[in-house]
Image (cartoon, rainbow, N blue to C red):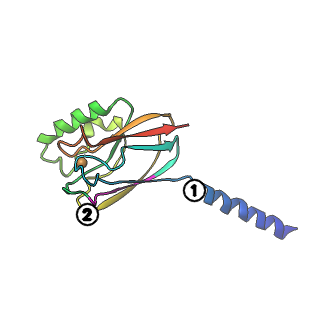
């Protein structure tokens, strides 16, 4: 009797663990193969509150350039883009990966600047609120074109 209880307790524990792992959204972002100023994926869907493991894999572009990935609160892409533009005169911009500090309240998650033939994986929890969350690359000159939308669903 005791043994059975122990086994089912173990199952409860491991089953809960694997269910949790299955609930991680694995996303790969890459530059578009033929459009150097675009992501290959411009539309992703993630459940609210889901754990996200996102890799920016900067390979496969016809015109390799550095890129980043910035996930932004709904409606704040112009504000973040304006702060990214303002960074162009900041001598520390490269060191800051072109992630504007001034817009940090509007940024949910971001990678660093990823050089060609490199990648970076970040983990974050998707927003609890459903909605369309814009993402963009803020390397100079990219954000108006290199962008997409993460749909957060309930
Ligand atoms: Cu870019």
Position of residue 32 measured from the top left corner of the image (x, y, whole percent): 29, 51
Say if disc 2 is inside 8 Å of ligand 1. Answer: no
Position of residue 50 measured from the top left corner of the image (x, y, whole percent): 52, 46
The span from disc 1 to disc 2 (Cα, nearest Å) is 29 Å
Instruction: Classify mark 2: residues with Cα within 10 Å, few (<14), some (14-19) or many (20+).
Output: few
Q: Which mark is residue 22?
A: 1
Q: Which residues are magenta?
A: 53-60
Q: Earlier in the sequence, mark 1 or mark 2?
A: 1
Residue lying farthest to the bottom in this orientation? 3
The kind of secondary structure element at disc 2 is loop
26 with respect to 116 (left or right): right
Position of residue 58 measured from the top left corner of the image (x, y, whole percent): 28, 58
Could you tell me how many numbered marks the image carries? 2
Residue occupying the point 21% across, 46% down: 139
Closest to the observer, 133 or 107 = 133
Residue occupying the point 16% across, 48% down: 92
Label 2: which residue?
117
Residue occupying the point 30% across, 41% down: 147
**Picture quadrant where residue 28 is located:** bottom left
Instruction: Classify mark 1: residues with Cα within 10 Å, few (<14), some (14-19) or many (20+).
Output: few
Q: Is residue 50 above or below residue 72?
A: below
Q: Is residue 56 magenta?
A: yes
Q: Which mark is residue 139?
A: none
């Amino acid at each position: 009797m005791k043994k059975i209880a122990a086994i089912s307790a173990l199952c409860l524990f491991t089953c809960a663990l694997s269910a949790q792992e299955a609930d991680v959204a694995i996303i790969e972002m890459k530059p578009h193969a033929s459009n150097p100023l675009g992501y290959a994926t411009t539309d992703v869907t993630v459940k609210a509150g889901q754990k996200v493991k996102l890799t920016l894999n900067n390979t496969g572009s016809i015109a390799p350039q550095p890129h980043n990935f910035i996930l932004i609160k709904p409606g704040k892409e112009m504000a973040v883009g304006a702060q990214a533009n303002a960074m162009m005169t900041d001598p520390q911009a490269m060191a800051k990966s072109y992630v504007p500090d001034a817009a940090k309240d509007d940024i949910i998650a971001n990678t660093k600047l990823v050089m060609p033939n490199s990648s970076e994986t970040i983990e974050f929890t998707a927003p609890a609120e459903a909605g369309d969350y814009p993402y963009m690359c803020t390397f100079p000159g990219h954000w108006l074109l290199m962008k997409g939308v993460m749909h957060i669903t309930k």
